[in-house]
Amino acid sequence: MISREKDCSVVRLSTIGWIALSAALKPFAGGAMYLNYLTEGAGGAGVRAAYGSNYERLVALKSEYDPTNFFNSNRNIEPQP
């Protein structure tokens, strides 16, 4: 059986590895982002970058089908006013 302390060390090492890999691959991403890994600090610019060229089309759809922004959790696309 693995101790809890050892389990935590493995998790920390895997997290550090993931962060290092993400940083190493960033120059090759061409400005694109993976939506599930956006942080709260990324804000609207991060959401726009994650959806790329589809963003404007998605704003139009959101404005048509959810103009009150009822579905606003996660990485929200704001409807046009």
Image (cartoon, helix red, strand yellow):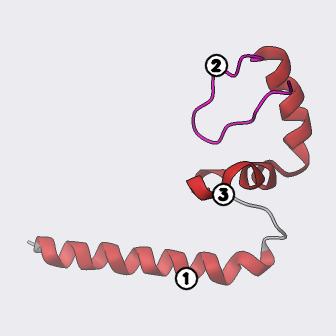
Residue at 64 percent of width and 42 percent of height: 75
Inspect the magenta stretch and tell me whether residue 77 lies in it.
Answer: yes
What stretch of residues is rendered in magenta? 66-81
Q: CA distance from mark 2 to mark 1?
A: 37 Å
Report which residue position mark 1 lands on: 20
* Dominant SS type (magenta): loop
Image height check: is 14 above or below 52?
Answer: below
Q: CA distance from mark 2 to mark 3?
A: 21 Å
Query: Residue 46: image x %, image y %?
Result: 73, 55
Q: Amino acid at mark 3?
A: Ala
Query: Residue 38: image x %, image y %?
Result: 62, 56
Q: Quadrant of residue 30?
A: bottom right
Residue at 91 percent of width and 34 percent of height: 57
Residue that extends furthest to the front in the rendered view of this protein: 81
* First along the sequence among labels 2 and 1: 1
Residue at 64 percent of width and 19 percent of height: 70
Image height check: is 7 above or below 42?
Answer: below
Query: Residue 7: image x %, image y %?
Result: 21, 72
Q: Quadrant of residue 32?
A: bottom right
Asked if the residue at tag 3 contacts the one at tag 1, i.e. Cβ–Cβ closer than 8 Å, the answer is no
Does 4 sit left or right of 73 as displayed?
left
Image height check: is 7 above or below 76?
Answer: below
Does 42 sit left or right of 79 as displayed?
left
Q: Which mark is residue 44?
A: none
Q: Amino acid at mark 2?
A: Phe
Q: Which mark is residue 42?
A: 3
Q: Which mark is residue 70?
A: 2
Q: Amino acid at mark 1?
A: Ala
Does 45 sit left or right of 76 as displayed?
right
